Image (tube, rainbow, N blue to C red):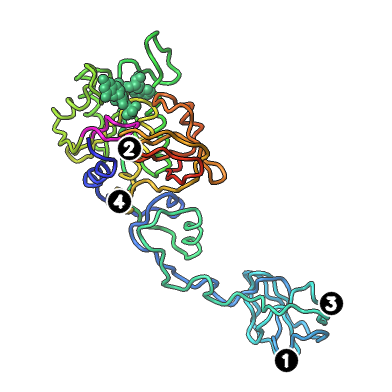
Amino acid sequence: MITVDEALAHLFSLVSRLEPETVPLREAHGRVLAQDAEARRDQPPFDASSMDGYAVKRSEAVPGASFDVIGESAAGHGFDGTVNAGQAVRIFTGAPVPEGADKVVIQEDVTRDGDRITLGDRLEDKPNIRPRGDDFRIGDRVEAPRLLSPEDVALLASMNVAEVTVTRKPKVALIATGDELVMPGEDPGPDQIIASNSFGLCALLDTLGAEPRMLPIAGDTREALETAFDLAKGADLVVTIGGASVGDHDLVGAVAGDLGMDRAFYKVKMRPGKPLMAGRMGDAAMLGLPGNPVSAMVCGHIFMAPMIRVMQGLPAMPAPRLSAKLATAMPPGSPREHYMRAQVEDGTILPERSQDSGMLSVLARANALLIRPADDAPRAQGDWVDYVPI
Ligand SMILES: Nc1nc2c(c(=O)[nH]1)N[C@H]1C(S)=C(S)[C@@H](COP(=O)(O)OP(=O)(O)OC[C@H]3O[C@@H](n4cnc5c(N)ncnc54)[C@H](O)[C@@H]3O)O[C@H]1N2
Ligand code: MOO
């Protein structure tokens, strides 16, 4: 059996960055920038007022000073003339500051009488002006690779970037295997259960910005699996669920092998997730996940998600880890690296009482996978441990 780190190294060697494509900005959220995007203008494009008030010369803005109001500058409609000594222009937030003015006195500090204003006794020192290019300048870049957040999209819009070049979405085919499985909403027979893993993994793939495709459930026969692999053609990654262990009906490895899968490894020294397999299958990478529902989801976070990120052009990195203080002592760990379902709250982490890899209710209420290294020594309450947020 290989370690989790060794398995990840194999998985990274099975995938590479996909081709770039250009998409409208509206579709950029959650995509990974494949080419730097460049600001097409300065922002603000002119010295802009940050408040509603009066634009004057800063040197004249002293308590009690009076000015003639000679015009108005509103957002979208600037003032054409110049502000000279003793003059003010009525100005609104976002409007261009007129020539000659270098301060905006907020209207709360001003008394107006017709076209004459007088400043109050206590004035703010701030100019209340956002200088041209203060936010960004023409040619400034958002650098690739970058997973685009809603804030990035807002910035790109402001830069007048209407389209971005991003990595194409990884196409992922999901194959659930097992005669016992039926789809949610169907009527299960007495020995049957509902297929849950492909739904959880599809949802995870959605959040990762991939393009999942759920194939029909494949029964435990060679023919059914061959048909499923055939339907998966065209995918960048084929993910099978179940049938990975050593039982008489666990056929995934054998069928994939017969179909030409070049296996990189089988079995990882981890809990849950031991019977994991992976390899190359024609143009696609293949990841065989164990069927136990928690094992499949944990492997989704620990192995599938980092593979997707590499296909998107992001660096080859394990799932990001944080650390927290243990809320309780723990007995010695097991010989396999253990990803324990746990709850993190206010910087402390509490492992769930049940760590059965069939218990989805436990996984669903957990918000962390507490990582115990292989053969970990007993841990005291208050010890720092690593975890992967989920
Ligand atoms: N003799 C041994 N038995 C088992 C071993 C072992 O080393 N020696 N490993 C155990 C471990 S660890 C795991 S994990 C499981 C994995 O087995 P498979 O990948 O072959 O998965 P299945 O047998 O097909 O299913 C296991 C379990 O999960 C349910 N399942 C499967 N697919 C789904 C799905 N899409 N949605 C919901 N539930 C699913 C299935 O009904 C089984 O209950 O093997 C252990 N056995
Ligand atoms: O590895 Mo199994 O995934 O421990 O339940």
What crowding class fits label 3: few (fewer than 14 Cα within 10 Å), some (14-19), or many (20 or more)? some
Which residue occupies the extreme bottom position in the image?
85
Our reading of the magenta stretch's main secondary structure is loop
In three-dimensional space, the C-alpha distance between marks 4 and 1, rounded to whole angstroms, equals 62 Å
Q: Is mark 3 within 8 Å of ligand 1?
A: no
Q: Nearer the viewer, mark 3 or mark 4?
A: 4
Q: Position of residue 155 (x, y in %)?
A: 49, 61
Marked residue nearer the N-terminal end (3 or 4): 3
Residue at which label 2 appears: 375
Determine the residue positioned at 74% across, 85% down.
Answer: 61
Marked residue nearer the N-terminal end (2 or 4): 4
Can the viewer see residue 96? yes
Q: Which mark is residue 85?
A: 1
The question of residue 197 being in magenta is answered with no
Front in this rendered view, residue 1 or 216: 1
Say left or right for 160 vs 179: right
**Range of magenta residues:** 266-277
Q: Is mark 4 within 8 Å of ligand 2?
A: no
Determine the residue positioned at 41% across, 31% down.
Answer: 200
Q: Nearer the viewer, mark 2 or mark 4?
A: 2
In three-dimensional space, the C-alpha distance between marks 1 and 3, rounded to whole angstroms, equals 19 Å
In three-dimensional space, the C-alpha distance between marks 2 and 4, rounded to whole angstroms, equals 27 Å
In three-dimensional space, the C-alpha distance between marks 3 and 4, rounded to whole angstroms, equals 62 Å
Could you tell me if the residues under marks 2 and 1 are in contact, i.e. CB atoms within 8 Å? no
Residue at which label 3 appears: 111
Front in this rendered view, residue 337 or 49: 337
Say left or right for 338 vs 130: left
Looking at the rendered structure, the kind of residue marked 1 is Ala
Looking at the rendered structure, the kind of residue marked 4 is Ala
In three-dimensional space, the C-alpha distance between marks 3 and 2, rounded to whole angstroms, equals 76 Å
